[in-house]
Amino acid sequence: MPTAIAQPGRTLLDPSNHTLIMIDHQSQMAFATKSIDPVQLRNNAALVAKAAKGFQVPTILTTVAEKSFSGPIFDEIQSVFPGQAAIDRTTMNTWEDPRIAERVNAIGRGKIVLAGLWTSVCIVGPALSALDQGFEVYVITDASGDVSDEAHERAVERMVQLGARPMTSLQYLLELQRDWARGDSYNETVATAIAHGGGYGLGLVYAKTMFSAAEGH
């Protein structure tokens, strides 16, 4: 008979146990992305970036052929990390660029969280490579996208079959907060949820405006 203990499970994310890699959120890649509306994609990418910044999660930004073809990284991401230059690659598989491996090893965390364009190429490549090397991999599926629903869904399915764990952008934010009594991150988490959390964000605005509500804080 197992014993219940009031502590989080080992596979849950917290600010100290993972590295976030945001891959190829660029205009040229977004033009052909059809599995998610581009406005929603940009919103979700901003949510993820702000969550990582707010919780001080080590974040690697990377682009492909930025100057010659794909364009700059979304401003929704770059504005959150204004002093951080994206690593610009030629490889479709981010994991094959030695600079990425160097950064990942320097950070030294066993969990990798991925988001980017396109799911079937730019996310599948590093996800499968990292899994093969013993990392635990999480994919933020609604901050990623592909040329069709079919391409996105098959890519996610392929990664899940090999052990990757799918999640959403709002789930990522709330999993990092996890306890509303954590006062040092409460205000920023709520502000990010209000700005980018869709209906949940509207609900927060309503509750706080009408009833001065707080989530047990």
Image: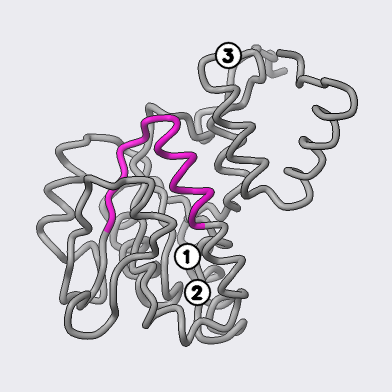
Expressed as whole percent of the image width and height from the top left, the position of residue 117 reads: 42, 72
Residue sitting at 49 percent across and 57 percent down?
A: 45
Extreme front residue here? 209
User: Would you identify the image quadrant in which residue 173 lies?
Assistant: top right
Drawn side of residue 85 relative to residue 59, left or right: left
| Residue in the image at 55% along x and 78% along y | 154
Q: Amino acid at mark 1?
A: Met
Q: Find the magenta span and give its range.
A: 45-61
Where is residue 214, by image quadrant? top right
Q: Is 24 or 157 nearer to us in this picture?
A: 24
User: What is the CA distance from the residue labelled 2 to the residue labelled 1?
Assistant: 6 Å
Give the amino acid type for the residue marked by disc 2 in the picture: Ala
Question: Mark 2 or mark 3, which is nearer the start of the sequence?
Answer: 2
Q: Which residue is mark 2?
A: 155
Considering only vertical position in the picture, is 75 above or below 125?
A: above
- Residue 39's label in the rendered image is none
Q: Which mark is residue 183?
A: 3
Earlier-in-chain disc, 3 versus 1: 1
- Quick one: label 2, few (<14), some, or many (20+) residues within 10 Å? many
